[in-house]
Amino acid sequence: MTDKNLYPTGPTFKYFSTSCCAFALTFLVTLHSASILAQGSTPDGKVEKPQSGQMPYFDAVPDPLEGFNRGSWVLNDWLFRRIIYPLSSGYNAVAPKPVRNKISNAGHNLTYPVRLLNNCFQGKWHGAWVETERFGANSTVGLGGFFDPATKWGIGRSDEDFGQTLGHYGSGPGFYLMIPLVGPSNGRDAVGKIVDLPLDICFWIGVAYPHEIWPEAIRPGFAFNDISGNARDYKRQLDSFVDPYQALRTLYSLNRQRLIIDYLPSYSGDCNPDPTVNSVLFKPVAPNFADQAVTRKAFIPATGKKLAYSCWMQKKPAPLVCYLPGLGSYRLDRSTVAYADMMYRHGYSVVALSNPFQKEFMESASTMAVPGYGPADCDDVVGALKLILSDMRKWKGDKITGTSLTGVSQGGYFTLMIAAREAAGRLGGLTFDRYVAVNPPSQPAHAEQRLDEMFDAPLAWPVAERRKRMEEAIYKALYFADNGLDVSGSIPLTRIESDFLIGLTFRYTLMSVIEDSQRRHNLGVLNRDPGKFVRQNSYREIRRIGYAEYTDRFLLPYLINSGRGNDRENLIASTALNQSTEFLHNNSKIRVQICEDDSLLTPDDISWFRSTFGTNLKVYPVGGHLGNLYIPSVQEALVRLFSDKTTK
């Protein structure tokens, strides 16, 4: 199996935040919190009794050294942001990607003895032979490993290390360990790194030249080369998460276990996943499109802070599309960048901002102590859009020929709410030429209920099998993250597995919202202080809270205490889009795209969309929630909604 444990390199870590896109399943993000959600026991061995309607939990790896580990994380994060990232920008300019790839190939080639011996230690004789073939081909024809003819010739890989060898023979991870200057590990893998050290050819180069400095810099040089290639992606990931330490601890621990057991997904069983899983295939066409974004900031008087936003401007005058991403999504996550790339390729300039359920917006633009009430969050979005468009017109006003507003999922919900406000004359001068909403949930309360139900889906499994089958779903997601998702055949996920992974994704989003909001505005709901440096106990409390409980314990009391209402049912009802039917009905500026099999919509919701938007509604029979956006024909039809007179 391919080892992805290097920090912070490797394709698994490279994409580990692609991102909490609203109601769009991204398997990597799913796995950030996967280790804390399954049946089992706590690190002290006590079985946790599941509460009604909730999933039981376990910690994938104990973290008794959390204080030390978080301190190491702070150091590593500082080194990356202050030293490695700035240096990588210059390095990447003088060493383009093909050069960096060749250097990376050479560095990997020099660790051949590590892979050879650990394959042998585990009795993986075929793997040992494959690695020998690869080393021979790349060391000779590949000129010392700088080139990789082995891959072109179909020679595989069998990356193994001593940590995996120990795990192969039953050694557990022990405890989590964040090593200064190195990155995530655990007790077992730390021992493995020590044993593997003298098996690296770079080590013996240093032994051969004991009085020279340059041999000692070879392996760190290879590591810097690998990190530099992913530095921008990694920084975006750091910026998008409330607590990257928590996410990395989980991802590392689960992925190491997957590699140790050499996991391969099984295609047996009833493979009928929710089509939403295909949303992971929606990605930018243009290489490094995210890097082409210009980041600007708009001052928000209501908070006294500046809100960052990203823009991609056409060189010639063009219409501007303002994009609102889905629940918990960051302005530079993969799905947001994919949407921006789609519009940019069709001649539009694009502006994107983070979702109100994402820390950047919460900390800079939200006037609410806790987000989640649609009308209030929409107020904050409108305020941010006014200031962003004002800044854009001062900066590039001569390049903007018109403006449209669009969004997916919760972003689509806000798009329709804003369209209704304009029709009602309540936007205070803000106006758009066109509104395009993709898969908007018409009833947020129902959508949140469905997310809780999806998270609870494994309760349908027998208790004795539940933990194993949940782990199976998690390993499948990790496998797809590394190897891609092939939709040409049957995707090896059952409906329960896909529902669980979708629900798990957005339970992590909710955890982040609670942790971030209560750290800044502690409402006194939690028993444990969310502001503490050591947060394991706090997370164990927060991870039990679903969307319905969040609404009842955090959101509604806050709304009532702040004078926004005093009736639970009326407050919830006020968030539904049908409250604005008279302003949305046959509105010539609005276009909507939905899927009939979207699990966040009810049959009554579908009927409401049809009766409200008529010919301005595009309905697909299948696609789930954002699960058809990767299809070129769907993208072409979506782009046409920005300029057509009626839908087809």
Image: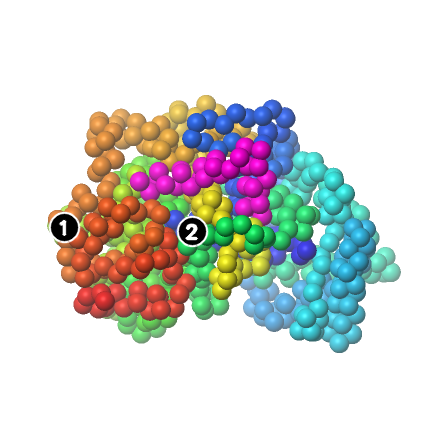
> Tag 2's secondary structure?
loop
Please identify the quadrant where the N terminus is shown: bottom right
Q: Residue at x 25, y 51 (%)?
A: 606
In the picture shown, does residue 287 fall above or below 383?
below
Tell me the amino acid under the disc marked 1.
Phe
Q: Residue furthest front?
A: 269
Q: Residue at x 35, y 27 (%)?
A: 553
Amino acid type of the residue that numbered disc 2 sits on in the rendered structure:
Asp
Residue 401 sits above or below residue 613 on the image:
below
Question: Looking at the picture, how far across and down is residue 545, in whole percent?
Answer: 43, 32
Residue 611 falls inside the magenta stretch: no
Pointer 1: what residue? 583
Report x, y in % for residue 591. 23, 60
In magenta segment, residue 464: yes
Near-viewer residue (292 or 456): 456
Which image quarter is the C terminus in? bottom left
Taking the image as shown, residue 223 lies to the left or right of residue 302, namely right
| Nearest to the observer: residue 625 or residue 218 | 625
* Highlighted range, magenta: 446-475
Residue shown at 24% from the left, 46% from the top: 604
Quickly name the residue at label 2.
274
| Whole-percent x, y for residue 66 in the image | 61, 33
Residue, x 38% and y 36% (percent of image)? 547
Query: In terms of secondary structure, where does tag 1 sit?
Result: helix
Query: How far apart are the alpha carbons under marks 2 and 1?
Result: 33 Å
- In this picture the colour scheme is rainbow
Residue 200 appears in the figure: no
